[in-house]
Amino acid sequence: RHERLCFNDDIQGTGATVVAGILAALRQLDLPVSALAHQRILIAGAGSAGIGTAIALRNAAARCILKNNMNFAQLTKEAASKFYILDAHGLLAKDGAFDWDQFTPDQQSFAQDFDVPNLYRGQTLTQLIPKIQPTIILGLTAVPGLFSSEILQLINQYCPQRPIIMALSNPTSKAECTAAQAYSCSDGRAIFASGSPFPSIEFNSKILTPSQCNNMFIFPGVGLGASLSKSITISDSMLYAASTACADSLTQDELDRGQVFASVTRIRQVSKQVAIAVIEAARAEGLSQLDFDAIPDIPSFVDSKMYFPHYVPLYQSPYDI
């Protein structure tokens, strides 16, 4: 990232997209952005996407409460204590670990200190949920049905607020649970998003619209904003700006339907807002090489650079032989 203008969409893009969804979910709960620092986050999946998402959420949690004279590194360490990440063998934890040396440094950073006592390597979802009482649960395992009815009911029972449930594995056949399962096992309380689309659900005479948490909400705007700003790199601050812009793009109607991402039909408008935020972030960090004096109106500038795929119809000449 410091040699080429690039970012890893599987790691950074997924992370930024999930951050956007969580920020929008906090809006659904009438909570401020700073409430992210107080969420307990359970992540099933410790691969590149799972750990990348954890890093993005941890950094966002630290960033949203960062003030003058605060140590960002210390804030991220404190934030990491509220993350509980599982792989195929259960909870990643130093205590009781038979495979500690096989953990990556990033995995180890989430496995050393927890804000809940008596956690050890290998604990399962059913063992952890009553102990940690997670407010957010994310699935990035590609294990269909991992979030069983028992798991979803436990989450609903022990979550002190409306649970935020994201089954992010693609396609729908690999999803950890369906939207219908999340809603029915939580008495309609769940705020749900998935990697692939699920249809709207009628529950207790109310239409609930699950959101699609897909990187398409982030990477086009990040790429456009980074290239137009002539940034020398794509920083974490630029990615966080993309997340907040994506979360802020929801209309009140979309929020009322329970969505945490904008409707896909508005993806072009969302991408524009993300691109503008990325340009402004690059400018604020001094990373942009763009001559802003020559561009007084950034939204119009972004508009002028967006490609619209409108094609002229083709007709075969009657004289072709």
Image: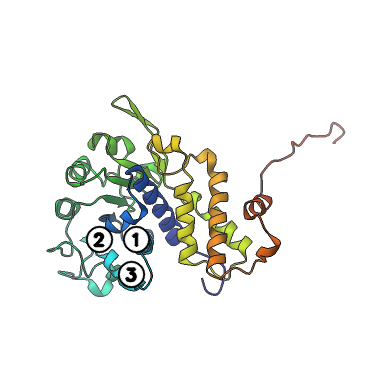
- At label 3, counting other C-alpha atoms closer than 10 Å, the crowd grade (few under 14, some 14-19, many 20 or more) is some
User: Quick check: 46 left or right of 196?
Assistant: left
* Left or right placement of residue 98 versus residue 167 in this view: left
Question: Could you give the CA–CA distance between mark 2 and mark 3, rounded to whole angstroms?
Answer: 15 Å
Q: Is residue 313 above or below residue 109?
A: above
Q: Are marks 1 and 2 in contact (CB under 8 Å)?
A: yes
- Between label 2 and label 3, give the one nearer the viewer: 2
Q: Helix, strand, or loop for circle 1?
A: helix
Q: Pinpoint residue 46: horizontal percent, then vertical percent.
A: 31, 61
Q: Within 10 angstroms of label 2, few (less than 14), some, or many (20 or more) residues?
A: many
- Tell me what residue is drawn at x 76 percent, y 37 percent: 314
Q: Which residue is mark 2?
A: 82
- Horizontal side of residue 138 vs 213, given as left or right: left
Residue beneath label 1, please?
Answer: 61
Relative vertical location of residue 273 with respect to residue 202 in this rendering, above or below: below
Q: What is the three-letter code of the residue carrying label 1?
A: Ala
- Mark 1 vs 3: CB contact within 8 A: no
Q: Residue at 39% of width from left, 35% of height from top?
A: 256
